[in-house]
Every structure is written in C-alpha cells, then in structure tokens.
Amino acid sequence: MNRVALLEDHERMAALIVKALAAAGIETDVYSTIAQATDGIARLPYPLLILDRTLPDGDSLTLLQQLRARQVLTPCLMLTARDALHDRITGLEAGADDYLSKPFSMEEMVARVRALLRRPSQLQSLAPEYAGLRVDPQAARLYYGDESVSLAPAELQLMHTLVRAAGKTVRRTTLEAAAWGLADAVTPNAMDVALHRLRRKLSAVDAPLQIINIRGLGYALLSADHSSDQPADHAQP
C-alpha cells in the first residue's frame, strides 16, 4: 500500500501536503484530531505516519508514545512550528524517525517521506516489481518489458498493493482501503470497475499475469490461465 496517514488540523497545510505527495504517487488519508488518527491507524496498516505536533485535542507525541509502547514501529515524520533543539530531541526520543520544522518546502517534505518509505524495516520498494511487472508511483505507470500504460490514482494504489503482494492473495477490504482510504465512501461497483480496467491494461502491455478472484479470499496476480475457483496462497490481512 502506497498510502500514508497525515495528522494535521490546518486545512490549507494539509491540502498542500496531499497535493505534493499525490504528485509523487503517494496517496494520503488526512486526520484533524488525535482521536481520529488513533482510530484510523488501528484500522489500516499505514507504511508511514506524518504527525503535526499541536492538535486541538493535544500533542501528537502522546499518540506516538502510545504506538511505540505497543511496539508499533511504523516510521514517523514529525511536523512542527517549534524549532528549538530540545523540542526536536523530545520528538526523536518519543519515537519519531525524522523531524521537519515549519515552514518547509514541499519538495523537502516529499523527499523525507520517500526516504522513510525506503527504510529497510519496511522491506518494500517504492517501485515494486513482480514477475516482470513494475509499478512506478511517481510516473503513475505500469511497466512490462518495453511496454507501459498509465494508471489512474485508484488503479495505481491497487496495482501497487497487488504487485507488492507477489502472487499472494489480498483481501478486497485491504484493496479498497489502499485505493480509496478510510474517509471516502466506496460505491459498491467502484472496485469491480477499477479491476476491470486494470485487467485490460495488463493485457495491453502483454503481461503474463492477470488479477484473479480467489473465491472467498480476495484477489491475486496469477498466470492468466489460473482457474478463478482454485485457492491461492493465504490471504494477507
């Protein structure tokens, strides 16, 4: 999943961050309170957290300390208007992986987010590959050999998740969360439409894999002749 969580109560700042990350192929779920973020993080395994320090319901360091106490090691980038040395030290000691003081350039913010997403502990690439298929989030394209095709935002997140699963089955709810997040309501046929388009795009680049519905489990990238009623690997949570 190439979707991160942002805890930021300033609407304009949040919108700028979302726009900058989207241009890099990274989708963002925005939370404006610690309570909202706590619920969202519990429901979706984000690969990265971006936390503003000062929120209407407290200091986000409290949330970070609670996560670290539960051994939730998701990389965290702290955003703050505070630039005093002791504030930076406090944030890092609370478990933050990086610290960015306001005001900051969006280019630097995106660079730091991408760096944290590359952390070895995540064991994942920003441009994952599987069986010759490669997804480039920044270019929003799917590659196979010399062929490539563009991907719409939801298609990009779906394919990114499936390629990174490397043939393992991914639950429908996990794919929906990756593509549309938790905040937006997903229409009943949105997933089916997106998957239909992705299947056509896989054919357009002559990929040897297709998105197969593993009945009762979810979806996986498998050889095109794989029977849809044959169980695949265990579903990922």
Image (cartoon, grey):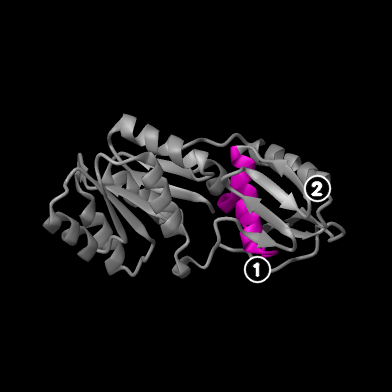
Which residue is denoted by mark 2 in the rendering?
A: 205
Residue 174 shown in magenta:
yes
Q: Amino acid at mark 2?
A: Val
Quarter of the view holding residue 217: bottom right
| Towards the viewer: 148 or 209 | 148
The residue positioned 37% from the left and 53% from the top of the image is: 49
Crowding at mark 2 (Cα within 10 Å: few <14, some 14-19, many 20+):
some
Determine whether, in the image, residue 13 is placed left or right of residue 55.
right
Determine whether, in the image, residue 225 is placed left or right of residue 91.
right
Quarter of the figure that contains the C terminus: bottom right
| Towards the viewer: 17 or 38 | 17
Crowding at mark 1 (Cα within 10 Å: few <14, some 14-19, many 20+):
few
Q: Main secondary structure of the magenta part?
A: helix
- Start and end of the magenta stretch? 153-175
Q: Indicate which disc residue 234 carries.
A: 1
The residue positioned 50% from the left and 39% from the top of the image is: 22
**Is 96 located above or below residue 51 in the figure?**
below
Quarter of the view holding residue 126: bottom right
* Residue 182 in view (yes/no): no
Locate residue 175, reporting x and y percent: 59, 50
Locate residue 52, reporting x and y percent: 26, 45
Q: Amino acid at mark 1?
A: His
Locate residue 216, reporting x and y percent: 69, 57
Q: Callout 2: helix, strand or loop?
A: loop
The residue positioned 50% from the left and 45% from the top of the image is: 26
**Is 21 located above or below residue 218 in the figure?**
above
The residue positioned 55% from the left and 61% from the top of the image is: 125
Q: Earlier in the sequence, mark 2 or mark 1?
A: 2
Residue 58 shown in magenta:
no
* Residue 127 in view (yes/no): yes
Which numbered mark, 2 or 1, is in the foreground of this view? 2
